[in-house]
Structures are given as structure tokens and as C-alpha cells.
Image: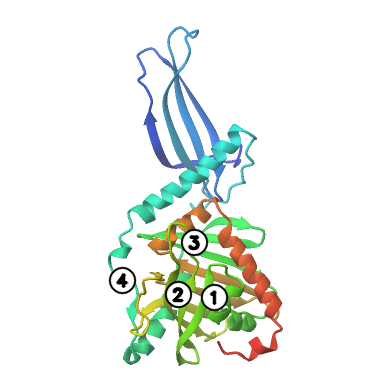
Amino acid sequence: SRLCHAHPTLRAIEMFHFRGPSQVGDRLVLKAIVNNSFKNSMEVGVSAEAYGQEMSVSCRHINSAFMTFVVLDQEGQPRTLPMVAPEPGDGERRYREASARKKIRLDRKYVVSCKQTEVPLSVPWDQSNKVYLSYNNVSALKMLVAKANWALAREKEKVRMYTLEEDKFLSFRIEMSVCIPAGRAFSLLSNLRRRHEWDSHYVSAELVQKVDDDDMIYHVVSQKLRHENKPQDFVILASRRKPCSKGDPYVVAFRSVTLPTHPARAEFTRGETLCSGFCIWPESEEMSKVAYYNQAMPGYLNYVTTNVAGLSSDICSTFEACEKFLLKNKDDLISRLQDF
């Protein structure tokens, strides 16, 4: 209550652990302390200690648990909470362990129990269905953008990271305002061959098929993941669309496809993306809101949950590098003339 200046609401109890029995006549003392806060929730560690009738006898630690609390606004939605500044020593340990437990909770829900890998996520590319696949690529991203219940997970300076939890999918969105016209940002971000200039995860992107002026298929090679012994590769359909009407964003959508000319190869781990991409809204003639969306897949989830839990700032740092790339190249005449 002192942290949030309101009455918090219990959302969940986890890791409930009985350490020993209590006896009739014991005097129980409950101790609670805030371990960490995560934008709109906080973890509170609770322990129960028992004393015998003779208070001189040392206490017995009989129970412990970790509780998640939220503070609801007038509409019943979780409010943003103040950040916790951990005290040196034990406070810093509890702070780090709370972040690790948040990652474990996400992993249990989306990594351990995930069955998405049972069927391929890539769709076969065929000239006869190219209109349908391109339309579906853009439509899927727009549907993800329009979903409610996005929750602010992290902020790093002017970069904001949101998460959306539904069914067995964990999606994230990361956004910021950039001093660049929306059309210029659209031109630069829709060219996957330049993504390695700001995204260190990308090694190369080869254009393998130009479907039309707004739809391209790339073969992308990315860096090795920590748990892999070889780099990943993707075959990605990139579809870009300009706004249809005032208020609509510029859209650059990505999804995996399969091509007979680019089968999985032994030297790579074939990765897949189901729905990801950029949406760019003009805020003024010289300012734009740039947002990246990703419906995280099993091979990528561990990386995402590490960032959501606050154990890494890699996603935010990558987006900051994206901003520098946009600012550096916004007046580049060659890029201005490029369609992709």
C-alpha cells in the first residue's frame, strides 16, 4: 500500500512451499516484502514463522510463497506502478530473483507447454495463390495491431515495450517516436537487405523473388542462438502497403513461406515467423511513430521472455539502433529512390 498509495489486489499465488508443520497454540508471524515491480504488477515475498508458547524459543520458518499484486483503476484495469529501487545486498538479490521468476512463469506458459512446433508454420508459395498469401500476410499483422489488452511491460528512455498474452501465443510490440517522415521510414524499413545495418541478429538478406513492386521473398540468415550450434535461416515473404485512408499506418508485414528453390539446408537451422512487421503512423510532417510487432515462435520465445522479465535489454537496444539508422539515412537520396 505504501508503494502504490492504494489498496492492491491479489492476482496470483505461486511457489507455495510448506517448510514445516505448525502446532496448536503456536503464534504465527507473517512477513511480507516487495521484491520487484513490473510496470503494472509487483511481486511480494511472504513468509510465515511460528513461535511456541514460550517466545524465548527460536522461531520456525514454516511456510513461504510469492504473491503477485496489481492496483486496479476505475475501469478495473491494472495501473502503472512505481519502479522499485532495490537496497544493496539482500534487496538486490531478491530483485534479480523476482525477475528470474517472472521469466520462469512466462516460459512455463509459452515455452514448456507450447505445441506450436507440431505442425509447420510456413505456407507453400505458389504463383496461383500469391494474391491471397500477400493479402493474408498484411491482414494478419493488422489484426495483431488491432487487438486489445496490450500491456506495457518495459520502458527504456523513449522506447516502450508491450506484451499481449492470448491462447498459447506471447506477442510483443516495441515502439518509439522518431524525427523522420513516415514515408521515409517506410522506405527504409521495408528493405530487408539493409536490416543488418541496425539489427545485429541479421547477417544477410538475399532477394530471391520479386513478386511485384510491394511484395518480395527474401532468404534471411541470422546469427546463431545461444543454445544452437549453427545459424538460423528463414524464407520470408515481405509485403508492404501504403495507407488506404487518413489515419491508417504504413505497413510492412513478414511471414515465412516455403520455396522449392530454397529447402532447409544442413548448415542452418530453419526458423519460422508466423506474423511480424512494422507499422508506421505519421505524427507530423517530420515525426513518426514506429512500432514493431512480433508473434513470438517457440525458437524465439526464450529470447523474448528474457527481455520481458527485465533480465536483458537487447530488444530495446536493437530498436534504439533502428532509430539511429533511420536518422542517419533519412536524407539519403539513393534510399529515397529505392522501392525496396
Against 64, residue 332 (above or below) is below
Colour mapping used in the image: rainbow
Against 272, residue 242 (above or below) is below
Against 80, residue 161 (above or below) is below
Horizontal side, residue 3 vs residue 261: left or right = right
Residue that mark 1 sits on:
279
**Residue at image point 69% right, 81% down:** 330
The N terminus appears in which quarter of the rendering?
top right
Q: Which of 202 and 9 is in front in this view?
A: 202
The C terminus appears in which quarter of the rendering?
bottom right
Q: Identify residue type, mark 2.
A: Leu
Horizontal side, residue 153 vs residue 289: left or right = left
State how far apart marks 2 and 1 are (Cα).
9 Å
Going from the N terminus, do you reach mark 1 or mark 3 first?
A: 3
Residue that mark 3 sits on:
150
Residue that mark 2 sits on:
141
| SS for dot 2 | helix
Going from the N terminus, do you reach mark 2 or mark 4 first?
A: 4
Q: Identify residue type, mark 3.
A: Trp
Residue 167: x and y in percent read: 35, 60
Crowd tier of the residue under label 1, counting other residues whose Cα lies within 10 Å: few below 14, some 14–19, many 20 or above: many
| SS for dot 4 | loop
Numbered tag placed on residue 120 in the rendering: 4
Q: How many marks?
A: 4
Instruction: Name the outermost residue toward the left.
Output: 118
Choose top left, top right, bottom left or bottom right for residue 153: bottom right
Q: Identify residue type, mark 1.
A: Cys
